[in-house]
Amino acid sequence: MIDVEKLIDYVSTRMKTIAIKHSRCCKVISPLSKCNLCYDICPSKAINHDDDKIVILESCYECGMCAAVCPTEALSIQKPTEFDLLEEIEKAGHSDSKIVLTCRENNKGVLQDAIVIPCLGSLSVEFLFFLNTLEFPIYILSSEVNCQSCRIAKGRTIYFEQLKKAAIWQQNINNTVNSINNVTEISSIINSKEQSNDKLDIGRRQLFANVFSSVKKIPRLTIDSFSASQKKAYNNDENNLVFHSFRLQILKKRLSIININEDCVLDNLFQPFHDKKCFLCKACVILCPVNALIYEQSNGTILLKTDKCTGCGLCVDICYNKSLKLKTKTVKSLLSKQVTELIVDKPEA
């Protein structure tokens, strides 16, 4: 028997652009967390943190920029995810279709076959790295004039900052591919003849155009999804579910294809290291939002799953003895599925 009240709440949540996983938020887990990335980037300052949850105010523009920077993906874009977008882009690229990615303000319904997202500032560094290393061109349409007239005025600036970070990763791994073409005019991308030749491809990409608009009807699929989620919630507590960072998976997927030196560093991606004496209070293990830390009671060590760690820094913030610090992650540590010893000290008697 379906709980109608819960169904309504579930559907209303699914219709929103941003999905929230409160238990993954560093601020919710501990007031000692110094993470303010979502609040700092939010153009409407619509994000607050209550005692045990993230609160998104009605003033939210649903631009998605908070999701692009949240290290634990406590905030994420529901549909389409960046995985969805990449699948669509790769299909189109391999079929020699011209790929245009833009935002609502810059498109304004002109290009019917463009992939339209709320704001270019919602694209993560990992996603942009993937795009810029593809074998075919990607056209990203944005005009400074259009973006300045948008209420999300800093979206274009954030996008170029993220793209610059992706370019640094490419430089570190000696990858010289540059697939992203930033254009300011539609005429630079497609002429009328090319548009007519692409009509067969419009249907597929239309699926992704303006997908962030709210759905007004509840499809059977949503009800089925709700029923499945209820069963899952009954059998699993959210905190015990295995966490997989979608953004790290995107990055891993691309790095595993590119021939690179695994010792190369990935600037702006971090992981903890042991700096001084640890008293094994295990607070870092207990509170890690992505379950990247394991305590081995048999030998008194704390292990780190380097491929799971998102570098949120909560373990560093909450450590009473300041035993941990952050260091830049390498390609090898990201791709490795082996755990490493983070803390090997025995507690003092």
Image: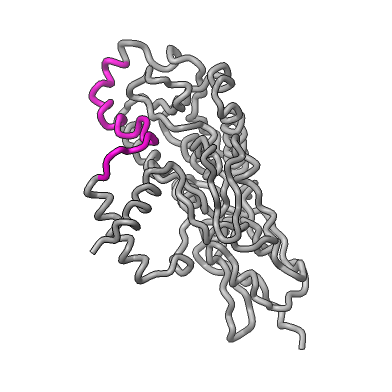
Decide if residue 45 is in sight here. yes
Image label count: 0
Residue 209 part of the magenta segment: yes
Given residues 177 and 79, the one toward you in this image is 79
Instruction: Give the residue furthest to the front.
Output: 5
Taking the spot 46% from the left edge, 27% from the top edge, the residue there is 103
Residue 170 part of the magenta segment: no
- Image height of 127 relative to 31, above or below: above
Q: Quadrant of the N terminus?
A: bottom left
- Image height of 139 relative to 324, above or below: above
The image quarter in which residue 81 lies: top left
Q: Horizontal and vertical percent for residue 131?
A: 46, 36
Instruction: Give the residue furthest to the bottom.
Output: 349
Given residues 186 and 340, the one toward you in this image is 186
Taking the spot 47% from the left edge, 23% from the top edge, the residue there is 105
Taking the spot 60% from the left edge, 35% from the top edge, the residue there is 43
Q: Which residues are magenta?
A: 195-218
Q: Quadrant of the C terminus?
A: bottom right
Q: Is 341 placed left or right of 61 in the picture?
A: right
